[in-house]
Image (cartoon, helix red, strand yellow):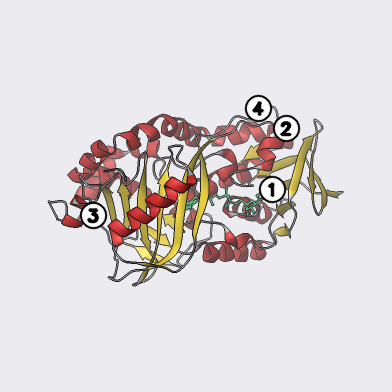
Amino acid sequence: MHRCQCVVVGGGVAGLCASILLCRAGVDAVVLEHRENPEKKVCAGGLSGRSLHLLSRMGMPFDAGRAVTRIELNVVPHHYNRFVTKTPLARVADRKTINRWMMGHARDAGVRVIRGAATRRVEHDGRRFTVRTDRGDFSAPCIIGADGAVSRTRKSLGGSEPRMARALIAEKVEVSRPLDAAIFDYDALPMGYGWVFPTSETTANVGVFTISPMGGAELRERLYFYTSQRLGGVRFASPVKGGILPWGGCRLDKKLPALLVGDAGGYTDPFTGEGIFQALATAGHAAAAVVSNPPHKVRRAFERRMALFSANVRLLKRLGPLALKNARAIGRLGETGLFSRVFFSSQVRGQYYLGMAASAPAWLARSLLRRDVVHREHERNVPLHLQSMKPDLQN
Ligand SMILES: Cc1cc2nc3c(=O)[nH]c(=O)nc-3n(C[C@H](O)[C@H](O)[C@H](O)COP(=O)(O)OP(=O)(O)OC[C@H]3O[C@@H](n4cnc5c(N)ncnc54)[C@H](O)[C@@H]3O)c2cc1C
């Protein structure tokens, strides 16, 4: 039996981030990662402005990948909203690069990552957790569950299941004309969107996301349909892969000093599909709670630190589906340019939606005065290629 102060289950973004912060603060933590090669996670690699902001604050500034200074938030075929900014609104990097770079920070911080240690069961005897893995048993008074969407930690400890969104992605397609903007096309499929993230002048990753209970075969058909409508003739240079994105949060016995972070906690954003920011933010709160509290107070401290974040999750649980259902209204808001100024300015400063709403008047005033923060590129009419885009396969 290996004993330590805190076991972190899962060596993805959330698990590595939490363990880096713990080890830097002198906590004896171990990361249990079930894959020999955890770089293979299916992901579009979009690091939003707020992820970049948070990473800088955590002492891990990220400047790899492609800076995104143009973004399209369209509602097809009705609204075309294209924004440009001097400060990068996001970065797109492949997930291998993100994971390797995170692993580098983990090595620098002296994090112990045990690979091939698939967690089978987690038990709690009232004082300590015992984590049973393929590489032996690990015991600690605190546990951070960062083992992704199908979390074994969550299941073992009796946590409720979050809701699940689905996405399909082709990580590399070769395009015939250069792309200069990251594109979100809402309503390209029901309760969801299609995206195109340029990764170089001539390549991009393309995908579809939905919170509707759509079957795998239909989603695949929609991805091909969307890609052909959006980009015309492209060559798929990588296979199409699927993934699930848990949202809406989950409930876990309040007496357990167990902290669920990232996808394990069900924290992805049901409107944007973003999950890396949420993984980093919750991991940061978990590490801070473990560092400055005795084990029996850790859970409470975590809940307190998470108060604003959790309120945001509850809000999104209601508003996310509503917004997806009424994407046209959001698109109209976007057309005013004001909504997006607040949204993007707040994004690059790392705010949650609730924080954005509270400080909207101040951001608005500031971004109107400083037009370089973000402005709408002028094109009053929806371009032809979007007007002819059919949102529904049947039409
Ligand atoms: C197609 C797709 C595209 C996406 N694109 C984006 C994007 O562009 N931007 C964005 O912000 N988010 C995106 N997301 C969401 C984002 O990838 C996740 O929200 C984020 O990776 C969550 O990080 P995590 O560390 O919680 O989980 P993960 O990254 O899934 O890490 C979990 C880790 O736990 C390990 N593990 C699992 N089970 C066990 C076990 N039993 N024992 C030990 N280890 C275990 C796994 O091997 C893995 O390494 C996308 C998701 C999908 C599916």
Say which residue label 2 marks.
Answer: 296
Query: Eyeballing the image, is 231 above or below 282?
Result: below
Real-space Cα separation, disc 4 to disc 2, in angstroms: 11 Å
Residue at 58% x, 46% y is 283
Q: Which mark is residue 9?
A: 1
Closest to the observer, 184 or 49 = 184
Mark 1 and mark 4 in contact (Cβ < 8 Å)? no
Real-space Cα separation, disc 3 to disc 4, in angstroms: 45 Å
Badge 2: residue crowd in 10 Å (few <14, some 14–19, many ≥20): some
Mark 2 and mark 3 in contact (Cβ < 8 Å)? no
Residue at 42% x, 31% y is 315
Helix, strand or loop at disc 2? Answer: helix
Real-space Cα separation, disc 3 to disc 1, in angstroms: 41 Å
Mark 1 and mark 2 in contact (Cβ < 8 Å)? no
Helix, strand or loop at disc 1? Answer: strand
Residue 317 seen in render:
yes
User: Residue 48's image quarter?
Assistant: bottom left
**Identity, as a three-letter code, of the amino acid under mark 3:** Arg
